[in-house]
Image (cartoon, helix red, strand yellow):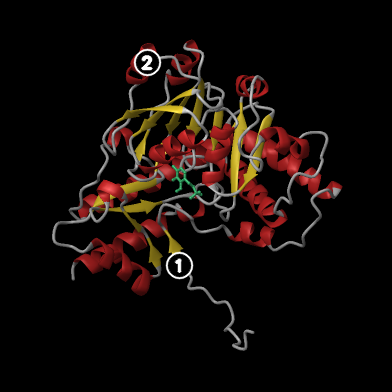
Amino acid sequence: MITKIYRDLNPSPRLLLGPGPSTIHPRVLRAMAAPALGYLDPEFLALLDETVSLLRAVFQTQNEVTLPISGTGSAGMEAALCNFIEPGDRALVCVNGFFGQRMADMAGRYGAQVSQLEKPWGEVFTAAEIEAALQEQDYKLVALVQAETSTGALQPMERIGQIVHRQGALLVLDCVTSLGGAPVKVDEWEVDVAYSSSQKCLGCASGLAPLTVSPRGMAALKGRQSQVANWYLDLNGLLKYWGPERAYHHTVSCALIYGLRESLRLIIEEGLEARFARHRANAEQLWRGLEELDLTLQVPLAHRLPTLTTVRAPAGVDEGEVRARLRDEYNIEIAGGFGPLKGLIWRIGLMGFSSRRENVTLLLAALKEILAG
Ligand code: PLP
């Protein structure tokens, strides 16, 4: 039996400038506190329809099948793979960082014969490299990360969709760190399956993974010989609720739908192009300021992500201690590196409501003070 009375919830007012979650917009926080509706209440169903149509606008797609998956970005990744992979299918996964590797791991768990096209962490793939890999071997699916959060690299998307489709494969794209902060053009790029997460550039709490599937993707799902190996994420089941039937599948989180809808409304109010320009301008201000502090940016300008910056910690500086001081003395969260970049870099996110000029100024001033000793 618990006898202790825990103190009131009073989290520190952290400025979230890491790779996610980002700071939640006050309007989104207010929306999430609204009274709950039942998952079949007509009022709630109307809000679901609005959320889906806002998501289509943000994904820049006409795809009928567009919905927020319950779960974080990894659930989106899982849904994007489990529905389109049958045991024995060949999958080409482009791996140039931590999240590409996670996709390869998941695809293998669903029985795919996975080939990894690898590049050093921080580099990106050319369309010609993907084309060459597809000429050597037929694949059912090609998976790629657009914004590799572990490295700060932005994958160029020109021509890739056409190349993948010429070979008859499906293109799966991870847009977890790009959607809402950098262009994601699902239809123009001929992406068949794209997914993201609610807590980064969309500016909501974590817990939803927007997903969109092209008609070609849906045809592949319909043509499966075997059942989807994951019950919860099987689109055939999910679409019973998200489609016209509106039948129970699982209890979708009302608070999260309110929050996502509000965060999408904020994006459309701002305008996609204006939002991307804001993310880019604040990132550029950060890059200039870091260079003025004599710090070296990890990724060349040509394929640097505007939403997540990686910067090398100077030699002789304990990067973990700097992060701890930022947190404890300045209430600012940034992150360190993963895998081969562990201990070597900082990862600074400027996403959604966190992407603001005054945040950049504050972070640079705090870093300057700390690095001065
Ligand atoms: N893909 C990328 C590129 C990510 O950055 C992340 C999380 O940071 C994920 C997938 C997994 O998302 P989540 O942590 O929300 O499950």
Q: Is residue 348 above or below residue 3?
A: above
Residue drawn at the location 69% of the way across and 28% of the way down: 64
- Residue denoted by label 2: 131
Q: Is residue 190 above or below residue 147?
A: above
The mark total stands at: 2
Whether residue 307 sits left or right of residue 2 in the image: it is left
Quadrant housing the N terminus: bottom right
Whether residue 312 sits left or right of residue 83 in the image: it is left
Q: Is mark 2 within 8 Å of ligand 1?
A: no
Please tell me whether mark 1 or mark 2 is closer to you in this view: 2
Residue furthest left in the image: 316
Asked if residue 187 shows in the view, the reply is: yes
Residue 357 locus on image (x, y percent):
41, 54
Q: Is residue 326 above or below residue 132?
A: below
User: Badge 1, how many Cα within 10 Å: few under 14, some, many 20+?
Assistant: few
Q: Quadrant of residue 114?
A: top left
Residue 37 locus on image (x, y percent):
80, 56
Q: Secondary structure at mark 2?
A: helix
Residue drawn at the location 37% of the way across and 11% of the way down: 135
The amino acid pointed to by label 1 is Arg
Q: Nearer the viewer, residue 304 or 368?
A: 304
Q: Which mark is residue 14?
A: 1
Q: CA distance from mark 1 to mark 2?
A: 45 Å
Residue 229 locus on image (x, y percent):
61, 35
Whether residue 195 sits left or right of residue 105 in the image: it is right
User: Badge 2, how many Cα within 10 Å: few under 14, some, many 20+?
Assistant: some
The amino acid pointed to by label 2 is Glu
Which mark sits nearer the N-terminus, 1 or 2? Answer: 1
Q: Secondary structure at mark 1?
A: loop
Q: Is residue 246 above or below residue 365?
A: above
Whether residue 317 sits left or right of residue 111 in the image: it is left
